[in-house]
Each structure stands twice: as C-alpha cells, then as structure tokens.
Amino acid sequence: SSRSTRAFVQPSSSRRSRATFKTIRLASQFDDGGNGEVNGDDDGKGESGAASTVGTISPSDPYSFVVPVLGDLHIDPRKMEDYATGRNHILSIIDDAKSTLDQNDNKDEYNDYSRVCMVSLGDLGESKNCDHNPDNPFELFAGTTQCHEMASSYLGSFGVPYEVIGGNHDLEGIDEFDSDARNLRRFLTSHDKETPQFCRQVAEKTLLVGLCSTIFREAKFTSHEVIIDEEQIRWFEELVKSKPADEGWRIFVFSHAPPNGSGIRIIQENHVVNGCCWLNHSNEKQCQKFIELVREHRCIKAWFSGHFHLGQDYQDSITFPTVDPKEGPYPNRGSCVFAQTSVMRAGTSRDGRQQSRLIRGNADGFEICTVDHQKDGKIRLDATITFKGNSNEVGIYAHDDESYEHDKYFKVYQPCAGDKLHPPDEGFKRYNSDGNINPFDIEMDTIAWWYMSCGRALGMLNGNLIEYDSSTLAPLGLVVGADELVGKKIGVINSGLDADTCEMLFEEEEGMEGADCAALAGDIREQAVVLLDKDGLVTVVQPNEDGSYWRKIVRNKMVRMKEVRRVKAAKLWAADLMDLDDENDANVVSSWGPYTTTSGTAKKTSVPGLTAPSAL
C-alpha cells in the first residue's frame, strides 16, 4: 500500500525552474559535461555516439520507472540543513519524472501502481544522544519513537510512495523498548508497514524488494551486524522462485548491508574486523545464502545497499555480474549488479561525499546514477546496464574512478582464485611436496593467501591475518592482528596422524600440486597455522570450535553497555573507598569468560599479564 505523504517543515530555498518533457533523459539534467557525463544539450547519445535507449523513460513504455535511493540518513534533529538541501535535489528529480510519466496522485494513467517512488536503506537516526529527551540525557536517538516519527515525516514529504528497511541502528531504542519485537513494532507502525520486508511493483514485471534487519538486542555477536531473520529469508527465496527470469521478471533488491559475494568496496579497518560487513555475517550458512540465490535466480537484476558510509565515486562502488575475460576471471554474480549508496549529511560520511542513488529503467535495461548533494544535486551517469535476453545483462561504467589517486586508506585487496582461463593471483601460496607452507616473513605490505585442507581460506592484509569466504573470497574477519603479527613468520604445517595420506592418494595423478592436494584432501589432513617470532617462540593459531578462524571479538552492544556501566560503578566505588579526587584515577580492569586452555581441568581464572603475572 502507498505511504501517505506528510508535511515536512524545511528552511525556505529557491527551487530551480524545470521544463516539462514527455521523453527525458534524467541523467543529463544539471550536468556540466566531462568525465563521462552528458550535459543539458546532449543529443541522447553516449560517448560512443550510439543512441542510448536505456537512458530514456516514456509513459508509453510500461517498463519505464524512476526510483531515487537514499542511503543511511542518521537523522540528527539538531542538524537538519543537509536533509532539507538533499530533499530539494530529490524533489526536482521526482517532479520531473512524475510529469514525464503522466503520473498524478501516486498512480499513472496506465497502471494501478506508481512508477515513481523512493527507497530508504535504513539507519534512520543518529546513534548518540541528540538533546532530544530532557528526561534522559544519555538516551540514543536512533530507534526511538521520536526518531521513527521524524524519519517517517521526512520520507513521506517527497510526494511519492516510499519504502524503507531497517538497518543495524534502527532498533536501538533500548531505553524506550525492552525487546527487539516491541522496537520493531514501533518501526513498522511509524512507517505504515505491515511486515519488515517489502515487495512493490514499480513497472511491468518489475519489482522492488526490501529485506530488513530485525535483530539488535538478541544479536549473538556485534549489534552492528545486519541480520535478516529466517522468516524473511524463506519469503525472499519463495518470491524469487515464483518470478522466474524466463517469464520476463526483473527484481531490484534493497538491504542495509550488502550480501557476501557482491564485490563492492568495504572498510577493512572497521566492518571486516568487527564482523559486520555482510548480511548475516556471523552465520556462515545464512551469509552464503544470499549470493547463492543471486547465482541461481537471474530475475535478480540489481542489489542496492548502504551501511559503509562511503561515496559513489569509486568504480567498485558498483560491480557487474560479468566482465570481459581479458580483464579477469568470471565473478559468478548471476545476472545482478551490486551498488553501494552513500549518505546525505556531511557529518555521517567517512570520505567526505554526500550522495544518493538514482535508478531509471525501461524495457531495454536501466541506468544507475549519482545525485551529488555537494554539487547542487547534479546528476552523474555512473553505469548503463543493458538486458541481453531475460537471463543476462551487460554493464558499462560511465566514468573513471574519480577517487583513485587519493583513496589509499580505502584500498582493499581481495584474493582472486582465478578460473579456467586465469591462474590465481600472485599472492596465492602453494604447498610444498611435504604438504606444508614454508614460513615467510610478515610485514605491513605482505600479500599472501592460501586454502587450508578443510577448505577454509586465510590470507594476509595490512599486516593482519584474515579469513576469507571459501566460495566468494570475500573477507570475513580478523584472525590475528598486525600488532601481534608484523615482524614474525607464518606457516602451515601438518598436525594429524594422516599427514602423508594426501600425497599417497594423489601421487599417481599427473600435474597434481601441493596446493591442489591440500584443497581436495578435506578432513583427511589436520593442519596447524603457526607463528614464529625472532626469539624462537612458536604460537599456534587455533581455529574456533566450528572450524572457522576469524575471531568474533566485538560482542553485543547491550552487553557492552552494561559492562561499561559496571566499570564506571567500580571506579566510583574505588574513588570513594580510597579518597581519590577523580574517579578516573582508579585502576579498574575487567576479566571475562570463558577461559580458554588446553587443560581438561580449569583451576585458574586469572588473565596472565592483566590480573596475574605474565606467563612469558
């Protein structure tokens, strides 16, 4: 059902004049040319000079639609100027599109559905106190009734129906609601939603589908993980099964975080090490489920996400389902384009960009554009995706990587296993004839990766030992930090009774190398990852009980907040007991369980180097 439009009070500002067109290329408005862009006098042709039918919307084309996509809003009621400015930019696009498609009252003359609507990718409120509640100066704004009502008022003020999904901060009303279920009900009520997920028809056989994060307090690990519950996953699978590509269906998916295997730019120093990069990141089976559905169901044409607060000027903010074999291995992403979406407010951006996305589609394909809120809403064409039949599509980038020369902080290496036409990248480590990886030195710039015999993938990045997904080679999480690893050697050795079995099994196979042997041996071989320092100390990197290696270091935010309050109470108690002028002068440490040891009997609970003398 359509959201009702709502009033939104904003500072007065002049609206640019707009011409009304029956057929219009929205990507050309307000552009000044250059860098693969087109300007207001463009003749409808791309750089090659060929007519771009994908770039045209028309009321007579039942597949034509226009959808602006807003990234993480993180509304702070004290800082509304950027939201008012961004709203003007998006309103201009919406008004032109409605005029072009003859759409009035949220419908057009040809259909019962709106072909112009808007999607918000969640994280609606600022995750800090915003002076919004005088009765509780410590309450977070995100997730509160006040937050969701303000977000609803804002999103409902654009004059078209909107859809919204929850992000990892949208159930943070922890002082107001005592459960995720109650907080979720408030989110749904404020936005007139019947279910966390959504499915909206926007054009002929064209669906917008959203998946919503529904777990915060009950998250097993970090609360910053975006978790799609099992009921939604089943619903999504049934939906894509019922709308096959060979019947002409086109599905555009929206989630707060991207799925594992999307290949889009991430933040190694934040989301990877904290285990909150991908949808359902900490659940191995569910984390892989989304890309498996993308590969199987070619009706999924595009997937939009936010979460990282990164701009849209990097080419790997958009990834295509296929590439020219001359450029590299087949990415195995079905028929789906993945796109990262930036933020609107300056204070929420990690790289200074303030941008939204714009999707414009028709019978031939669709275009992905950037709406630049720092450049008076200028629209830049980023990528053109042309349908080749119902099950394939070809994408073309429309601009160079604008940030290439100054994005070293965000440069992320990801292993490449190659394919039948391409070998693995140069960082791939092969096993020797004994089935071991000889120890090698680790520095901050060391790049190396390998498969364990169990199929797990480990590798080095920025001095850290990282575990990668065995199928997509997307980073999963931190195993050993650079602070513990740089300056040492690392290697892989056999550790089981059947260490020689692999060589015996494959000795008659021509061309079988140690790396292939290790990958195929499965559970036949036990292995140990070992570190060696300059003093001869050897450290064994033990896997987790489930066989994975990456450490679930960051725990649930609710648990951590309670621990912080206990430490604060202990400092106040100590300061009072010892007559200290400042509570921060109190020496307070924490200890945690479980206490890991190889001993079958737990006799000590001390933490060496913290609550007891160091063992080394």
Image (tube, grey):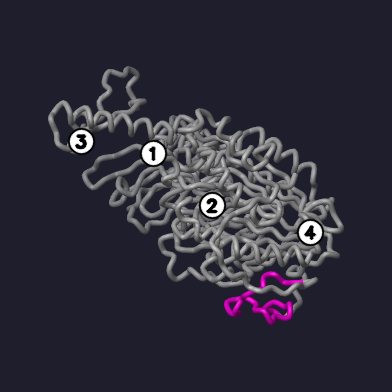
Q: Dot 3 corresponds to which residue?
A: 583
Label 1: state its secondary structure.
loop
Q: Marks 4/1: CA distance?
A: 45 Å
Amino acid type at image mark 4: Asn
Do the numbered discs 4 and 3 sit on residues whose CB atoms are within 8 Å?
Answer: no
Earlier-in-chain disc, 1 versus 2: 2
Give the number of the mark in front: 1 or 3: 1
Q: Marks 4/3: CA distance?
A: 63 Å
Do the numbered discs 2 and 4 sit on residues whose CB atoms are within 8 Å?
Answer: no
Q: Dot 1 corresponds to which residue?
A: 138
Q: Dot 4 corresponds to which residue?
A: 104
Amino acid type at image mark 2: Asp
Earlier-in-chain disc, 4 versus 3: 4
Q: Dot 2 corresponds to which residue?
A: 72
Label 3: state its secondary structure.
helix
Left or right of 516: which side holds 272? left
Label 4: state its secondary structure.
strand
Earlier-in-chain disc, 3 versus 2: 2
Earlier-in-chain disc, 1 versus 3: 1
Q: Main secondary structure of the magenta part?
A: loop
Q: Position of residue 158 (x, y in %)?
A: 65, 57
Q: Position of residue 106 (x, y in %)?
A: 76, 54
